[in-house]
Amino acid sequence: MLAAMSTSDTPPSVPGEPVSRDRGDACPGSLRLHRADDGALARVRIPGGVLTARQADALHEAARELGDGELHLTSRGNVQLRGLGQECGGRLAELLDGAGLLPSRSHERIRNVVASPLSGLDGRGHRDVRPWLTALDALLCGSDKAAGLSGRFLFALDDGRGDVDALGADVTLLGRSDGSALLRLGAAEAVLRVSGDDAPRAALIAAESFLEAAQGTGAWRVSELPFAAAELLEPVRAALRVAGAAERVPPTTAAQEPAYGVVGTAACVGVPLGRLTGAQWKSLSRVGHELRLTPWRSVVVTGVTPGDAAARLREWGAVGLITGPDSAWTGVGACIGRPGCAKSLADVRGDAEAFVRTAGEPLAGQLPVHWSGCERRCGHPKGAWADVVAVPGGHRVTRVRGDERDAPVTVHGSPSDLAAAVNAARRTRI
């Protein structure tokens, strides 16, 4: 793993191709810190991104006392703490354990679960997935087999609106209007219909079946298996005694990020580059009942009353958070870059900030843009996006459309030429 690995996995292999790895899974966790150029790094898994006020306070205290004072959001709705001292592990574990953020020390790195962040809040979706989230986390922590999952293995709980189904999870549950759930493995079009009550157990069985099938293959994720992911549905069907064959549904093509602003009984704000200062974090955590961190580096604050919403949004905008689609920060992302990552060729966060200040435009009618310090493109979006990669002496800009890429434009030295190339790559929505 890179010295400052961000939030994206290695690009998936083509099914049928062997996976070659010369070492085990090195993903950081809360208990196993990773050395980066800006200090040690801890990745705290937060299933569904859901935090109580007490848990949010514990994370803030950990960042303030042990790290760089900031909380870094990931594309899986988790939190990274950076700039940690190498000897802080005991105190960090104490803070997290006291807030209920370490329910199982042997399973903390495998609790990668994203969930529809507005589920149960805005009247959309077919069901509230929170009961699934609670049940699945308990099942994962109680399974000796599940402890063998890679720190990259991802579960997605979609309430039926299709927002997290498109995130490329290894195991996805989709809520249906009849109360049932569809189980999808990887990007397979074949799905298995199970009862809503059985859905969390079905997800666990699927993950355990993956571990058995992956033995000897080097696969850490479903996409890396040397056979079609749909074959893993049969063990689940047999274990749950599900009648009927697998159904086929078209895969979704784009994830749906919550709109910024007031949404039902909550409010959603974006976080520029996924980096929250202590003051910004406190301004969010002291308001609502809970925080829901999203896979798009935004935060849903629940319990925001209609009468209080306008004042809250003004407050959050004043401290630098994104409160509406007219912000030039909307759709702009970057990896950690220099000085945090030794592999990075540039301070791409600084480059992104300079772009937003001088030439950034609101996202409406445009593609998102992601700035990367090297070819790994850690944390990049899916679907269509403008890809900006640092190269020796400059940047390479490319419009990406799924697996296709337009001809790249390489810019050396000129900030105005770079801004023009980035804006040109963003202006055609695919």
Image (tube, helix red, strand yellow):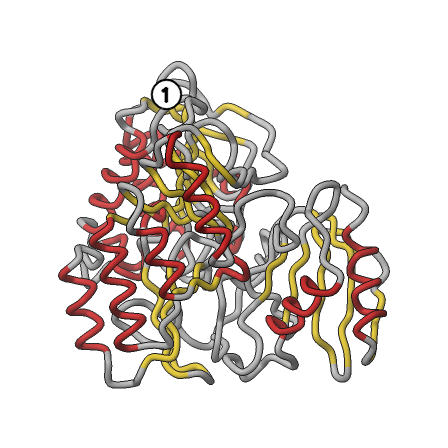
Q: Can residue 378 be seen in this view?
A: yes
> Mark 1 sits on what residue?
180
* Amino acid type, mark 1: Ser
- Point 65% across, 81% down: residue: 345
Q: Is residue 25 visible?
A: no
Identify the image quadrant of the C terminus. Answer: top right
- Estimate the x, y position of residue 130 in percent, counting from the top left: 30, 34
Left or right: 361, with 202 as reference point = right
- Point 78% across, 61% down: residue: 422
- Point 25% across, 45% down: residue: 137
- Point 36% across, 51% down: residue: 284
Placement of 50 over or under 246, stated as above or below: below
- Estimate the x, y position of residue 69 in percent, counting from the top left: 36, 72
- Residue placed most toward the observer, 213 or 96: 96
- Estimate the x, y position of residue 420 in percent, counting from the top left: 84, 62
Q: In which quarter of the image is residue 202?
A: top left
Placement of 264 over or under 98, stated as above or below: above
Q: Residue furthest top?
A: 178
The secondary structure type at the circle numbered 1 is: strand
Total marks in image: 1
- Residue placed most toward the observer, 246 or 25: 25
For disc 1, the neighbor class at 10 Å (few under 14, some 14 to 19, many from 20) is some
- Estimate the x, y position of residue 231 in percent, counting from the top left: 47, 39
Placement of 404 over or under 371, stated as above or below: above
- Residue placed most toward the observer, 207 or 181: 181
- Residue placed most toward the observer, 185 or 415: 415
Left or right: 335, with 31 as reference point = right
